[in-house]
Every structure is written in structure tokens, then in C-alpha cells.
Image (tube, coloured by chain):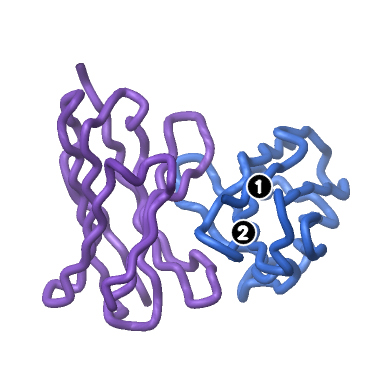
Amino acid sequence: DIQMTQSPSSLSASEGDRVTITCRASQSINNCLNWYQQKPGKAPKVLIYSASSLQSGVPSRFSGSGSGTDFTLTISSLQPEDSATYYCQQCYSTPAFGQGTKVEI
Amino acid sequence: QVQLQESGPGLVKSSGTLSLTCGVSGDSISSSNWWSWVRQPPGKGLEWIAEIHHSGSSNYNPSLKSRLTISVDKSKNQFSLKVTSVTAADTAVYYCAKKTMVGIFDYWGQGTLVTVSS
């Protein structure tokens, strides 16, 4: 099984800050990596697919990069509505999620 | 617009069987997608449980496989999950979700809280 490890587990930043979340796979997954945002009491919402493609309707301040085993989600200018928990998910084999990163503003 | 809706008991007794159904609208269960279950214990992260394709192919989380059964009902455009021998550790919000052919969970149900009681 492929394990996904995110860091940090939580962070606090100010409005307008640049925020970076890291996700590492236990083996190479090429670019088969998706990022989700989840707000309390809601289902997750896909932000980035295939490591770097922005899902339709998602603000351009969100971006993703990486391939192989190391991936990054970046929020270029943090907004109050970005307060949420973010999860990576590998799609190379049977699905697996990272443990999540809680972002507070 | 694709919509998914979970249904099933919100309370299950310990050692019993948890049964959930996901009704799908706006897409055919026979399309080229995988239909999945993901759960989230209170205050914790997401855990993928199982998935099924209309062809009958299925995959299970290895850590839960011995207790899981996923099935599809094409006539009702829905799919179901059974978890046997439940314990308090199975208490969670259970989501059903549509997974595309390239592995993106693009549509989710609203989630249903299942509590295992002793």
C-alpha cells in the first residue's frame, strides 16, 4: 500500500501570507496526486488534480506542484475563506489520503 | 448536476453490521466511474474504505477488507456498503463519492454520521 504523509499537521498564518503544504508518498506515484479542501461539517472539495491542474471554479491563488514522491500545495495570498483542512490523495493505486493539514487564519 | 445521498441507520450496536446505501442522481451507475465510500471519525482525517465499478470489480482498504462488502444495484442506480463486527472505532461520518477514471473524487454525498454503541 502507498502511504501519504502531509506536513505540517496544522499551521496559523495571516491574511495575505503565502502558505505551503507538503505531501510525500511512500513510493513514486508519478503525478497522480489530488488536493482537497474540507470545511467543518462539509464534504471535501477538489482543488487540484494531477498534481498541478486547477479544478474548474477554484481560485487561481491555489496551485500545486511536484511529481514522483514529493508534492506541494501553495496558497499564494491567504484569504479568510481559506480557513479549512487540506488533504492530499494519491490516485496511482487504490486511493489513500494524507492525514490532513489544518490551516487557521 | 451529479448528486449522491447516503442513507442508513445512524446508530448500530457493537458487534453488529453497519449497512449504508448511496443513491445517485444526475449520472448513471453504469458509467465509466468508480463508486466509493470514504469515512471520517470525529475530529480525524479521511479514510478511503472501498470502491466498486458497475462491471462488478471492487477494491477494499486492506486494513478493513475482511469486514467489508460493497455492492451495486443498477436498477436503482445506487450502491451499498456493509461493515460487519463493528466496534466504537467504526464510529464516523460516512461519505459516498464518485471517483473518475483518473482517480479524482469529484462528487460527494453530504455524509451521514454512524455511531456504534455498546
Q: Secondary structure at mark 1?
A: strand
The spot of residue B26 in percent (x, y) is: 30, 78
Real-space CA distance between mark 1 and mark 2, rounded to the nearest whole angstrom? 7 Å
Residue A35 position, x and y percent, is 65, 58
Q: Colour of chain A?
A: blue
The reply to whether the C-beta atoms of the residues labelled 1 and 2 are less than 8 Å apart is yes
Residue kind at label 1, given as amino acid type: Met
Q: Is B49 or B38 nearer to us in this picture?
A: B49
Q: Residue B15: x and y, percent?
A: 18, 26
Dot label at residue B77 = none
Image quadrant of residue B88?
Answer: top left
User: In the rendered view, would you say B64 is above or below B74?
Assistant: above
Rendered hue of chain B is: purple
Tell me: residue A29, above or below residue B1: above
Q: Residue at x 22, y 21 (%)?
A: B117
Which of the 4 quarters of the picture holds residue A32? bottom right
Residue B6 seen in the figure: yes
